[in-house]
Amino acid sequence: MFLHNFTYRVKCLLRQKSLVFWTMIFPIALATFFYIALSNIRTIDEFSPIGVALIDNEALSAQPAFKETLQQLAEGERPLFDLTVSDESAALEMLKDYEISGFIKAGVTPELVVLGSGLNQSILKNFLDQYSQNAAAITEIVSMNPEALPALLESLSMSQNHVVEKGITEKPMNPMVIYFYALIAMACLYGSMYGLEEVNRVQANLSTKAARINIAPVHKLKVFTAGVLAALLMHFSGLLILLAYMHFVLGVAFGDHLIQLLVVIFVGSIMGISLGTFISAVVKKSEGVKIAVVLVVSMLGSFLAGMNIAEVKYYIAENLPIIGYLNPATLLSDALYALYYYDFSIRFFINIAGMSLYSLLFCTLTYFIIRGRKYASL
């Protein structure tokens, strides 16, 4: 009898188009939109060399060190300038056509000519100011102690870095994964709709179908358990399809620990369904009101986990960390994040434990609420 109820409940859930859409099709569509909108997020802040022209005049011929300094800054793997040496009329034409950000005329005090203000223009001005200050300092020191010139030039040519950069993980940091991990968390919480549906199905005051189930010669708990397991199968299968699409089609990285990843998604699916059963059991309103509550909880949790704005997740982690530990979506997205970047860190196990406790709490409360519910008549 239990297998019979389970099999037919799976068939019934497959025919409910709204559930299939919100738990399977909608997350896939949203992941596609995320990929289109965020595909260039890693290259948007890359620096491009600043186009600048150097006027070839008599003053430049008298200052070969100035020209050599600019040429050095225009060389290498990551040059600061894209340097062009030309006459003033050609440089002015390039400036008007926005081919360069400005041009420099050498002299006692180098002169910068630009058409407007901006980041590139500010960098050019700061470079000229620093060069003028260094040149003035060298002139003054040499006038007082000519023998100090070689040591002074050597010290200026050396770039010392007293900070050693050391990453907390060997894997490349990709800000885009925060959005996709929060999306997976949202998809897990959307399992609440399955849980809501299963509780509504056994509440005799909501529909004639539920009334017939309550008077059938089968224990209500068995019917409910079969329905919840069918919902778990449907929801977990949808999450696997979402993961496969994000990884193989969109190229989202989930790390090398496939088994642990599946454990996270499975526990997240249980948490989502149990959350839906709890909301449906507690909220004694119409089905529409219950769906609205489920959507608000799911979307708000996903927002706080960084799905809409990644900075929200960082702000909460720094200023309101308790919300991060209480938010089911944050626990789930952090478990994925920790598994990808830090392998088996304590953070991963804390998140898994938090999700498991939530699932146990929701299931226990739902059981006692439903078991104690009586009806005057059916």
Image (cartoon, rainbow, N blue to C red):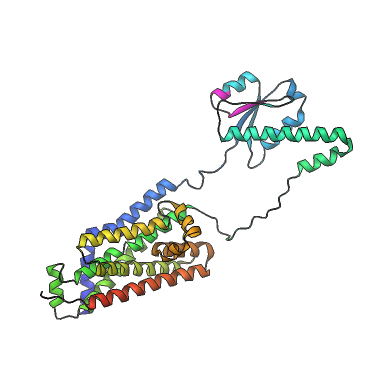
Quarter location, residue 247? bottom left
Q: Is residue 228 visible?
A: yes
Q: Quadrant of residue 290?
A: bottom left
Magenta run includes residue 47: no
Residue at the image position 39 percent from the left and 62 percent from the top: 329
Relative to 99, say whether 328 is above or below.
Answer: below
Foreground residue among 351 and 167: 351
Height in image: 74 above or below 9? above
| Location of residue 352 with respect to 187 vertically, above or below | below
Q: Position of residue 363 (x, y in %)?
A: 31, 74
Closer-to-camera residue (110/51): 110
Q: From where the camera sits, is residue 247 visible?
A: no
- The C terminus is located in which quarter? bottom left
- The residue at 87%/34% (across/down) is 144
Q: Residue at x 34, y 70 (%)?
A: 270
In the orientation shown, which residue stands out farthest toward the front? 319
Q: Is 342 placed left or right of 152 in the picture? A: left
Task: Identify which residue is drawn at 31% across, 76% down.
Answer: 364
Measuring from the top left, give residue 136's x and y in whole percent.
77, 32
Give yes or no for residue 102 being in the magenta stretch: yes
Q: Residue furthest left?
A: 377
Q: Hey, which residue is sitting farthest top in the picture?
A: 89
Front-lying residue, 299 or 164: 299
Q: Is residue 144 left or right of residue 206?
A: right
Question: Is 24 left, or right, of 9 in this rendering?
Answer: right
Q: Which residues are magenta?
A: 94-105
Q: Quadrant of the N terminus?
A: bottom left
